[in-house]
Image (spheres, rainbow, N blue to C red):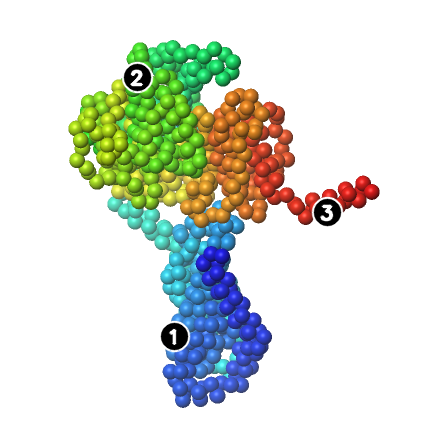
């Protein structure tokens, strides 16, 4: 048995024994009003004779009663007044009740928190976020209103993430008035007939009002804070728009669309191409490249299907032209014309915030709006690798134009970064026929996925000819050669690079500088771990950073870290300025930007009536390698980090008929399930079309459909989607009702007689 568990059992035993003794010996009989009245003179005499011992004994008794959540705290508070008088009694009762409450709080945390977290996973995370934000106010309210049972408040707060010191300080302050009322009543003990008589309806009413005070105070503080933020700015007397949106990528387009749909007057400003990163340099071109690469791969591996294989003749210029053609085909959906037709006032130009309500375009036109949404996106992070800047390196922002018109595929490609973008590119270029070396500082590719996912993807990339150098750092570029060396181990595990949603990190800053050998000397295995990688093109994909400068954030003092700081309503420092998408994070996906856009648009336009908090718990994402890696909710990595208990159910595609027929049987469906229930906590699918297959599980999670429901749903045969159902079947098999089955066996046996 683990030490923690032993400790818990011991503490629980002690508490149970103490409570049992209290009731077995009927100690409660001593903590009654009648007994207190009868023994008041005797107790006062003892206090006069042994003042210090009396205080200590009373204090300890009070702490024990409150810490064990025993009945009698109210009588003890009266006794404090009766025996010690108003001020001394208040002092003793106030500190003793706080100490007792804190001990009950800590015991509840130690005994129950892990269990509650495991059982209620996602819900307790949401409560914790609320407690982190407003816990002190809630606790103060509960403490001020004596109607909430003292011991319940202690135990309930213990299972939340509230800090013990906050709990103790707020409890002491919140209980003080009630304590004074009781202690004062205790000084008049002779006249009291029952504890309930201490509070008249009028007194209870005033306590309720007092209890509501913290909430009113919070609203007031919020109001003042907002006013203070705007101090120094002159608010326009009238606004010429309802909403101004900066940036026409996924985040900005969806924001503008929602605004126009509800008939608000919306202006959308874009300095570059409509459609932003996803359409022009991100998702669309990368997925189009991946498709061409798959064709090449299929020709090369056709023998597996009984068709003569060949080395594909890749017409690189046509591959790149196809990419641009697809961008052009999609572009009308994001165009100025379409959005103008939908009622959005679209302006081309560079937007700059002038004040919290005014945006200037290209230093000329000034527009005002009650709400502004910043959707300025992000750009590739470029690590300070010596020589890189002079190398003519490519990023996702530049490669599609730079490769345009080129007749042949670059023969040797070095890719720096092992996140989703780097890994998708590595596989695609290798399939097209390039000799690809992928360098990743961390110990594995796709570091946000579980280890087995990284291992499978890495193995497939290697089989397809990619040289994967995980645990390697790019140290410099000299002409057309990248020098890497084995990375020193990182504290706290490896970091991946290049993933959408990951922290960009300066590669060369992660390890101390070492003297570098001249090129051509250092070889892997030479003891220093240096390696020279000649390339024709080098692609940097170590992550993306939010666009944070050049459009007025600094002048307005809008807080930024890696991204613009926003609250759950997506408000920046100024509650009328919102931020969404890559510029706000924490994730960097098109569908995430669109999801946030709904909240920013609705809060911006209707926030004075009702505002909404964005929730990212059920967010899917897909890495478009072959097989694809699709992910929703928790995987083992994130569940372990969050301390959430889970059961793993795995279904291997090597058993699936359709996957076998397709020759796509490497991969699996892995479900994380709440122990004791059929509720999904998350899923990872590694499979051909995993991005499509995950949709069913996203829907199940979003609408609370358990594995039993999934199992009871007809899936067409033979499809890859059956894998989801079979995974649910694996879970069912592991939870067979053995007892019932034993009874059924007996029943059938009896029927055969
Ligand atoms: C190679 C690659 C592949 C990707 N693949 C996927 C994928 O498969 N799936 C997925 O979900 N995500 C993917 N992403 C991520 C996705 O592209 C982004 O998360 C998404 O585009 C973010 O949208 P956004 O609206 O926040 O920003 P953006 O699309 O970057 O739009 C911001 C816009 O704001 C404009 N702008 C900035 N400042 C100003 C200013 N001052 N005035 C006027 N205009 C301004 C910019 O010009 C830009 O057009 C990929 C990214 C890359 C790089």
Disc number placed over residue 289 in the picture, else none = none
SS for dot 2: loop
- Identity of the residue furthest to the front in this view: 526
Distance, label 1 to label 3, CA atoms, is: 65 Å
Q: Is mark 2 within 8 Å of ligand 1?
A: no
Residue at the image position 37 percent from the left and 14 percent from the top = 319
State the residue position of label 2: 411
The residue lying toward the viewer, choosing from 669 and 257, is: 669
Query: Label 2 crowding class (10 Å Cα cut-off): few <14, some 14-19, many 20+?
Result: some
Q: Is residue 304 above or below residue 471?
A: above
**N-terminal of the two: label 1 or label 3?**
1
Residue 430 position in % (x across, y down): 36, 20
**Residue 742 % position (x, y):** 70, 46
Q: Quadrant of residue 318?
A: top left
Q: Secondary structure at mark 3?
A: helix
Give residue 347's position: percent from left, percent from top: 33, 25
Asked if the residue at tag 3 contacts the one at tag 2, i.e. Cβ–Cβ closer than 8 Å, the answer is no
- When asked about the image quadrant of residue 454, the answer is top left
Q: Residue 559's image quarter?
A: top left
Is residue 249 at all visible to an observer of this figure?
A: no
Q: Which residue is mark 1?
A: 91
- Disc 3 marks which residue? 743
Q: Is residue 473 left or right of residue 289?
A: left
Mark 3 surroundings within 10 Å by alpha-carbon count, few (fewer than 14), some (14 through 19), many (20 or more): few
* Callout 1–callout 2 Cβ contact below 8 Å: no
Of 118 and 429, which appears nearest the observer? Answer: 429
Q: Position of residue 540 (x, y in %)?
A: 29, 27
């Amino acid at each position: 048995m683990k030490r923690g568990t032993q400790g818990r059992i011991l503490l629980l035993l002690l508490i149970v024994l103490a409570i049992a003794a209290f009731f077995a010996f009927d100690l409660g009989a001593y903590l009654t009003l009648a007994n207190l009245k009868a023994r008041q003179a005797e107790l006062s005499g003892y206090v006069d004779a042994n003042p210090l011992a009396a205080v200590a004994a009373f204090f300890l008794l009070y702490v024990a009663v409150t810490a064990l959540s025993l009945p009698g705290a109210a009588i003890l508070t009266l006794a404090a007044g009766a025996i010690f008088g108003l001020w001394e009694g208040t002092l003793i009762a106030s500190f003793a009740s706080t100490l007792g409450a804190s001990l009950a709080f800590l015991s509840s945390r130690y005994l129950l928190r892990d269990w509650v977290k495991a059982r209620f996973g996602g819900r307790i995370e949401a409560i914790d976020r609320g407690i982190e934000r407003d816990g002190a106010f809630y606790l103060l309210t509960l403490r001020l209103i004596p109607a909430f049972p003292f011991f319940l408040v202690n135990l309930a707060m213990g299972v939340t993430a509230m800090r013990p010191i906050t709990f103790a300080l707020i409890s002491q302050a919140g209980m003080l008035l009630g304590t004074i009322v009781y202690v004062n009543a205790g000084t008049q003990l002779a006249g009291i007939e029952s504890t309930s008589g201490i509070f008249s309806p009028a007194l209870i009413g005033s306590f309720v009002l007092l209890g509501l005070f913290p909430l009113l105070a919070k609203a007031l503080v919020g109001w003042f804070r907002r006013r203070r933020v705007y101090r120094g700015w002159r608010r326009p007397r009238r606004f010429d728009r309802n909403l101004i949106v900066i940036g026409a990528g996924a985040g900005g387009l969806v924001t503008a669309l929602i605004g126009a749909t509800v008939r608000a007057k919306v202006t959308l400003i874009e300095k570059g191409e409509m459609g932003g990163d996803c359409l022009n340099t991100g998702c669309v071109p990368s997925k189009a490249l991946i498709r061409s690469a798959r064709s090449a791969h299929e020709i090369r591996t056709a023998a597996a299907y009984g068709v003569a294989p060949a080395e594909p003749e890749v017409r690189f210029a046509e591959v790149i032209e196809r990419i641009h053609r697809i961008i052009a085909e999609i572009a009308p959906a994001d165009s100025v014309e379409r959005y103008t037709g939908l009622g959005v006032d679209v302006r081309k130009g560079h937007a700059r915030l002038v004040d919290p309500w005014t945006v200037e375009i290209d230093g000329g036109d000034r527009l005002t709006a009650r709400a502004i949404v910043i959707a300025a996106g992000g750009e590739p992070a470029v690590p300070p690798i010596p020589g890189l800047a002079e190398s003519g390196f490519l990023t996702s922002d530049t490669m599609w134009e730079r490769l345009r018109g080129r007749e042949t595929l670059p023969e040797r490609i070095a890719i720096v970064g092992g996140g989703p973008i780097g890994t998708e590119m590595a596989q695609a270029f290798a399939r097209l026929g390039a000799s690809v070396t992928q360098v990743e500082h961390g110990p594995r590719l796709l570091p946000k996925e579980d280890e087995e996912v990284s291992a499978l993807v890495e193995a497939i990339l290697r089989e397809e000819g990619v040289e994967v150098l995980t645990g390697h750092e790019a140290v410099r570029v000299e002409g057309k050669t990248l020098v890497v060396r084995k990375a020193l181990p990182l504290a706290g595990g490896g970091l991946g690079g290049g993933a959408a949603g990951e922290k960009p990190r300066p590669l060369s800053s992660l390890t101390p500088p070492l003297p570098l050998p001249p090129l051509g000397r250092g070889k892997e295995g030479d003891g220093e771990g240096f390696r020279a990688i000649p390339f024709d093109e080098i692609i940097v994909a170590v992550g993306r950073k939010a666009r944070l400068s050049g459009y007025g954030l600094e002048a307005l003092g809008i807080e930024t870290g890696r991204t613009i700081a926003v609250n759950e309503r997506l408000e920046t420092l100024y509650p009328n300025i919102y931020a969404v998408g890559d510029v706000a994070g924490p994730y960097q996906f098109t569908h995430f930007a669109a999801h946030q856009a709904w909240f920013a648009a609705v809060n911006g336009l209707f926030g004075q009536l009702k505002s909404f908090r964005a929730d990212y718990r059920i967010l899917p994402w897909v890495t478009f390698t072959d097989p694809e890696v699709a992910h929703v909710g928790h995987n083992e990595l994130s569940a372990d980090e969050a301390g959430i208990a889970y059961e793993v159910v795995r279904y291997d595609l090597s058993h699936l008929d359709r996957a076998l027929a397709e020759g796509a049987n490497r991969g699996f469906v892995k479900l994380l399930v709440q122990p004791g229930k059929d509720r999904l906590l998350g899923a990872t699918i590694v499979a051909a079309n995993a991005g499509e297959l995950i949709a069913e599980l996203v829907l199940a999670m979003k609408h609370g459909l358990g594995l039993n429901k999934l199992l009871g749903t007809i899936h067409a045969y033979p499809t890859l989607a059956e894998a989801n159902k079979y995974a649910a079947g694996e879970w069912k098999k592991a939870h067979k009702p053995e007892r019932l089955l034993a009874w059924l066996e007996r029943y059938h046996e009896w029927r055969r007689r």
